[in-house]
Every structure is written in C-alpha cells, then in structure tokens.
Image (cartoon, rainbow, N blue to C red):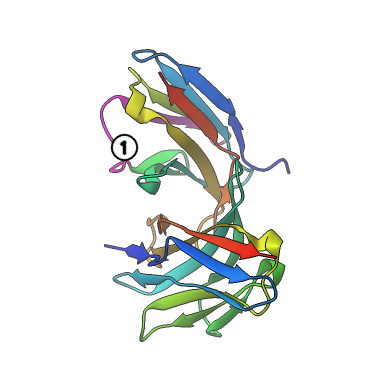
Amino acid sequence: DAGVIQSPRHEVTEMGQEVTLRCKPISGHNSLFWYRQTMMRGLELLIYFNNNVPIDDSGMPEDRFSAKMPNASFSTLKIQPSEPRDSAVYFCASSPGQPYGYTFGSGTRLTVV
Amino acid sequence: AQSVAQPEDQVNVAEGNPLTVKCTYSVSGNPYLFWYVQYPNRGLQFLLKYITGDNLVKGSYGFEAEFNKSQTSFHLKKPSALVSDSALYFCAVRDNQAGTALIFGKGTTLSVSS
C-alpha cells in the first residue's frame, strides 16, 4: 500500500485566493482526520470523518475552512479566502478505527503571502 | 474532555545514555495512549501504543513506554540513545469511547549528541 497520499506537497498562494488540499486515505480505513501543525499551536485536529461522514468539525477555525469526503478514497480541505495566518503544514491521517492508531500522510506545507 | 501534556519542549541526552520523554494525560474514561515520532519535513510515524494489558509497552527502534494509571503518565524511554533518535516526539491520547479522535501534545524535541 502506498500509504496516505496528500497533494500538493507544497503550496504558495496569495492572500485571498482559494486553496484546496487533497488526501487519499489507505484503502479499507474508515476514519479520516485533518490536522494542522504550527510552531505556536502544535498539532491541532481540524475535522474528522467516519465512513465518509463528518463527526467533529469543532476544530475548524473559521467558516473560511471547509472539508468534504465524497467517497471512501478521497477528501479535500478547502480554504477560501486564504489568509497569511493560515500558513502551516496540513496533515491528513487515516485509521481502520479503534483501537488502532493513525497513519499520517507527508503533509502539505501551505504558505499564504 | 481529553488532554495531553508534554512538559519539556526539549530533551538533550548524550549518545549511549538512557532517555526519557515525559507525557501526562487526562481523559474521562479509559485511555488509549500513543507515541509518534516526526523527522524533519516528514509526517508522523507510529512508535507504540497502550490499549490494555501489560503496563510496559515495547515499540519500534528500541523504544518503550510505561503506562502509570495512578500518575496518569505514559513516559517514553530508551535504554541507550542514538544520534539518529534526534527528532520531534508526540504523545497522543484518546478516550476509549467510540467517536473520539486522538489529541496530541505539543511535542518534545529530542537531541542526542555524539
């Protein structure tokens, strides 16, 4: 298995632009998680899905952020409009469920200028 | 609510010496506890987990961790550190209730000097 695949690896965009991050979880994993990593705040859980259904989106910082999981093999995290404070590394992770741990993707490093 | 604390931002140790990276947690039910490692510009990699059973858990790369329920701790240990162990280490916890996600500590940077 290729693991959790995230794209793009790096994204540089101008303030105000729409940004879409993509994630392909491991086949057979029924839970998917989006995390954001910054120096100041560490790893923050943004949202997670079970069986393609959003379970908890309380970590999504603002209405500018949205996430979808249209099927078991694909998820997107969208920021519209983007702001410089959104600059971070965004990780996607998947899991086969409790009590198993998560497998993380390599992350997307987002820079908003 | 669940939370996890890693009280040390950085741990420095000489190669060959034992290392400990501290973690304490808080959950309302019984905990599932994990340690992950992150190398520069990489995603997090699973090291070990405690679900139930023996309090001493052995994981990858010679690491182990001890679950202490009375102290609500899950410290990561290794008897003899390697320079290649230098990385960022995360402790994570979740309640064993269904529908909860892992909450991560802020991370501890381990620096092993030769």
Residue B111 belongs to the span the image colors magenta: no
Which stretch appears magenta?
A57-72
Q: Residues within 10 Å of mark 1 (few under 14, many from 20)?
A: some
Numbered marks: total: 1
In the rendered image, which quarter is residue B112 located in? bottom right
In the displayed structure, would residue A53 be above or below residue A76? below
Decide if residue B6 is in sight here.
Answer: yes
Q: Please report the residue visible at 59 percent of the width from the left and 78 percent of the height from the top.
A: B57
Q: Nearer the viewer, residue A13 or B53?
A: A13
In the rendered image, which quarter is residue A88 located in? top left
Outermost residue toward the right in this view: A1
Name which residue type carries label 1: Met
Q: Nearer the viewer, residue B61 or A20?
A: B61
In the rendered image, which quarter is residue B97 located in? bottom left
**The N terminus of chain B: image quadrant:** bottom left
Q: Dot 1 corresponds to which residue?
A: A60
Residue B23 in percent (x, y) is at: 43, 70
Q: Please report the residue visible at 55 percent of the width from the left and 53 percent of the height from the top.
A: A102
Outermost residue toward the front in this view: B114
Residue A82 in percent (x, y) is at: 35, 20
For this view, does B56 lie left or right of residue A52?
right
Residue B60 in percent (x, y) is at: 68, 67
* Secondary structure type for disc 1: loop
**The C terminus of chain B: image quadrant:** bottom right
In the displayed structure, would residue B16 be above or below residue B45? below
For this view, does A2 lie left or right of residue A11?
right
Q: Nearer the viewer, residue B33 or B98?
A: B33
Q: Nearer the viewer, residue B79 or A46?
A: B79
